Image (spheres, grey):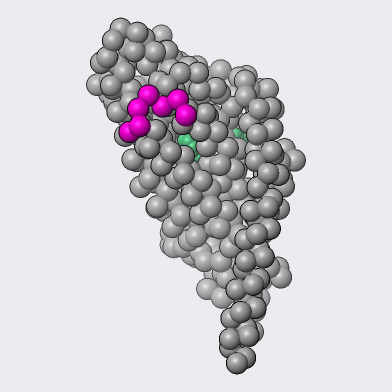
Amino acid sequence: MSGNDLGPALATDDDRVEPAAVDRQAGFDRLIAADERLEPRDWMPEGYRKTLIRQIAQHAHSEIIGMQPEGNWITRAPSLRRKAILMAKVQDEAGHGLYLYSAAETLGVDRADLLDLLHAGRQKYSSIFNYPTLTWADIGAIGWLVDGAAIVNQVPLCRCSYGPYARAMVRICKEESFHQRQGFEILHTLSHGTPEQHEMAQDAVDRWWWPSLMMFGPPDEASPHSAQSMAWGIKKHSNDELRQRFVDMTLPQAHVLGLTVPDQDLRYDEESGHWRFGPIDWAEFHAVLKGQGPCNAQRMEHRRRAHDEGAWVREAAVAYAEKQAQREASGAAA
Ligand code: FAQ
């Protein structure tokens, strides 16, 4: 597919003849219908481009804000081995943020602008990272439940219609699988340890269970973006489908852990083969989205401060890149 309608930030191909608008739309529709990938230089409707920027930016912001609740435990991890693993995991989240900002930049936006929007409260990040990590068991619960939910949500995104996002997700999902297992292993160790350790693991699961279900977004009938995103092949499944998939996958694992989830309505439906769960407190979800979660203010304050304190690193990187470019140019001229 040819053409470029993404503005001056992306290069144009002078050799190509801009097809008529109707042809461009038909070409785009054909690609989506054939479940093929769009690439940055392909023409795309403005709504598609904006939806991708919104989702990818929110996803990138979630990864970097998501470093905070776990980073909180690096100095207090119970052994050198646990500390090394946790540091590696938090570094992975930073890497995921970087792949995702890069994917967003292929759509003609600048990551500095996306960060400004986050800092101004004009772009979101996942609700889940507004809850506190009170004990070491929370690190296990984040790995098992939060990374577990992230995998269920993100594996289908590896097949999404936009190539750079799909490819970033392949690598991210591989790393998230490892994260999920390390969380499971922490909880397994605690759950089979002393009665106090078991209680700590259960308490963490009790606190993280419902917020993890909220990660999948509002119920389908209250999800304004789902229908269009699914028609465009960005989302492959609805929020409720993925939430159900997560519950079905996770409950047998809870059994192996020897832990329960805090839902009195939970029951296995033999006929459908699904676990049926109780009502989600959507008022809590909306309050968190409005900034009223237990840690929203703290997370944003920390993020803005880290950004300001890191200004010298960005300046140094730009100065270094400029110096390298100058050297290369003078080397080429010599
Ligand atoms: N939190 O119409 P929908 C991770 C917003 S990464 C906050 O259903 P959509 C890794 C939504 O943006 C976790 N806001 O929207 C990790 C929209 O607001 P807007 C992040 C939410 O986009 C692990 C409005 O509600 N993952 O965990 C949430 O079709 C451990 C209406 O919703 C991704 O971002 C929420 N939970 O579906 C890191 C995955 N849910 O923009 C560290 C990619 C909904 O109109 C440690 N994203 N909203 O103002 C997606 O799959 C989708 O964007 C959904 C939402 C499913 C999140």
Asked if 152 appears above or below 211 in the picture, the reply is below
Toward the viewer: 67 or 129?
Answer: 67
Asked if 123 appears above or below 265 in the picture, the reply is below
- The quadrant in which residue 183 appears is top left
**Residue found at the far bottom of this picture:** 334
Question: Going 62% across and 76% down the picture, which residue do you hit?
Answer: 325
Residue 170: x %, y % from top left: 39, 52
- The quadrant in which residue 12 appears is bottom right
In the visual, does 76 lie left or right of 281?
left
Toward the viewer: 102 or 53?
Answer: 102
Residue 324: x %, y % from top left: 60, 73
In the visual, does 132 lie left or right of 176?
right
Is residue 272 visible in the rendered image? The answer is no
Question: Going 71% across and 70% down the picture, which residue do you hit?
Answer: 8
Is residue 174 visible in the rendered image? The answer is yes
Image region (quadrant) for ligand 1: top right
In the visual, does 97 lie left or right of 77?
right
**Residue found at the far right of this picture:** 120
| Bounds of the magenta segment | 75-81
In the visual, does 152 lie left or right of 46?
left
In what quadrant of the picture does the C terminus appear? bottom right
Residue 153: x %, y % from top left: 44, 39
Q: Is 72 within the magenta?
A: no
Q: Is 76 within the magenta?
A: yes
Question: Going 53% across and 41% down the picture, which residue do you hit?
Answer: 63
Residue 61: x %, y % from top left: 59, 43
How many marks the image carries: the answer is: 0
- The quadrant in which residue 297 appears is top right
Toward the viewer: 67 or 236?
Answer: 67
Question: Going 46% across and 31% down the picture, which residue do you hit?
Answer: 74
